[in-house]
Image (cartoon, grey):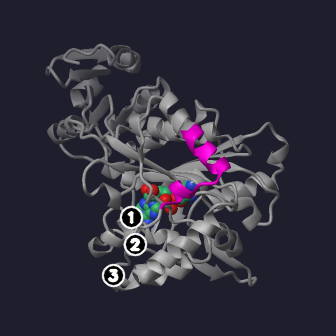
Amino acid sequence: MALIKSPRGTQDILPGEWPQWQRIYSAAERVAESSGYSRLDTPMFESTALFTHATGEHTDVSREMYTFQDRGGDELSLRPEGTASAFRAYFQHGMRVLPQPVKLYYLGSMFRYERPQKGRFREHHQFGCEAIGSPDALIDASLVALQNRFYRQAETTRLRIQANSIGDGKCRPAYLKELVAYLRQHEAELCGQCRDRIDRNPLRVLDCKVESCQPVLNHAPHMLDRLCDECRAHWERFQDGVAATGLAIEVNPRLVRGLDYYTRTVWEFLPEGPEGAQSVLGGGGRYDALAETIGAPATPAAGFSTGIERVMLNLEPVGGSKDQSIEVFIASMGPEAKLTALRVLAALWESGVPADMAFDDRSLGTQLKQADARDATVAIILGERELDENSATLRFLATGEQRSVPLKEVAAVVAGSVGDAPGR
Ligand code: HAM
């Protein structure tokens, strides 16, 4: 039988890659928690209706869901995003009575049946923050600043921030009518996907990247010029807020997002350069109208999320990664010495020293090469002579300097010396 492989569009995070993921997850936790956001974990699957109502029935996200009926006949879907679940949890657990806004963050897998390509997977991971319960435009601005701080801490390359306002239920319907009329007029000059979207999701037509559509789309009417007074005031306050945080944003009147729940502010972070628009790292916006789509009382909210895989693709290059490096590596020969090695290893762990040992029976020379490959500072050698003398040899790998230490003192001596080892 041929080896069964992982499903298309999924990936294993291998041991050598995990430290990088850990570093980025830690940056996310640090930035969110230091900004007053608390961690929320929701189920990997929810009722399908939650997502179709929240994200919009005709959006790509909704059509790409992994949907199934369970053995009890319930219609369920693997979560394609985190906002709808966070919002559901907010209502389900009575968070409306807490001081508003309630600030939540999450980290976890999302599932979309997309055509896999660079930076696009069927299972991807998101870090997201949601501030639920406030209509204040400064919340939107603070979220942009928080997202920016996360990218800086994760050490991504320089990013551009684009933003737009897509109005609300008061001013958008008239604009959509005007947009649809304009697109109809130019239908023949648009690609198949744009034509298909004119009635189902006209705003998304503005997002098309096909070269031949650009002349028509560049002259399409803009929502920004047609905002009602409340939406305009919100948009201006948002821009003042972003400026107060010291960030510069580009206004992109053609920026729309792939989910139906947005109102007013929307934004995206993308790499600098021409390819940027194809590989957005993350985006967000305000979604004041989401509550009514899921049958909840009117509740203003805003948030963002970012794909961790996209962050990985845009990291600042760093010299010589020290994946899974340790401080101490124990090389030993023979079953008796291995048992002693394990005892020393446990004592080192107890003292908080990152350490490992060779469990196989390869030569001492090969084991010392392993110590080098793991970037250890000190190797502890337990050979026949050492066992006879009840001692261990410490070898400082950067300088080759060696020292003999009584066995019962070795863990304490090493724990005390790794910080100021010669050659470090
Ligand atoms: P989204 O733009 O659909 O927004 O996804 C957020 C980010 O997830 C994207 O910018 C991208 O980095 C990553 N992403 C999405 N799909 C994939 C994929 N197939 N493969 C790899 N990465 C992917 C949302 O999900 C909203 N919930 C964001 C939000 C939160 N709005 C308000 N609050």
**Residue 402: image location, x then y, percent:** 18, 18
Vertical side of 286 occupied by 33: above or below: above
Q: Quadrant of the C terminus?
A: top left
User: Which of the two labelled residues, at mark 3 and mark 1, occupies the earlier sequence position?
Assistant: 1
Q: Position of residue 214 (x, y in %)?
A: 32, 69
Q: Which residue is mark 3?
A: 189
> Nearest the camera: 122 or 90?
90
Q: Residue at x 36, y 64 (%)?
A: 218
Give the main secondary structure, helix, strand or loop, of the magenta stretch.
helix
Cβ–Cβ below 8 Å for labels 2 and 1? yes
* Tag shown at residue 11: 1
Which kind of residue does numbered mark 1 sit on? Gln
Q: What span is colored magenta in the figure? A: 222-238
Query: Which-is-in-front pick, marks 2 and 3?
Result: 3
Cα–Cα gap, marks 3 and 1: 39 Å
Q: Amino acid at mark 2?
A: Ser
Which residue corresponds to the image point at 65% horizontal and 49% vertical from the top-left? Answer: 229
Q: Earlier in the sequence, mark 2 or mark 1?
A: 2
Residue 52 in view (yes/no): yes
Q: Is residue 305 above or below residue 74?
A: above
Tags 2 and 3 touching, CB below 8 Å = no
Crowding around mark 1 (Cα neighbors within 10 Å: few <14, some 14 to 19, many 20+) is few
- Distance (Cα) linking label 2 and label 3: 42 Å
Mark 2 and mark 1: span between their CA atoms? 7 Å
Q: Please give the label number shown on residue 6.
A: 2
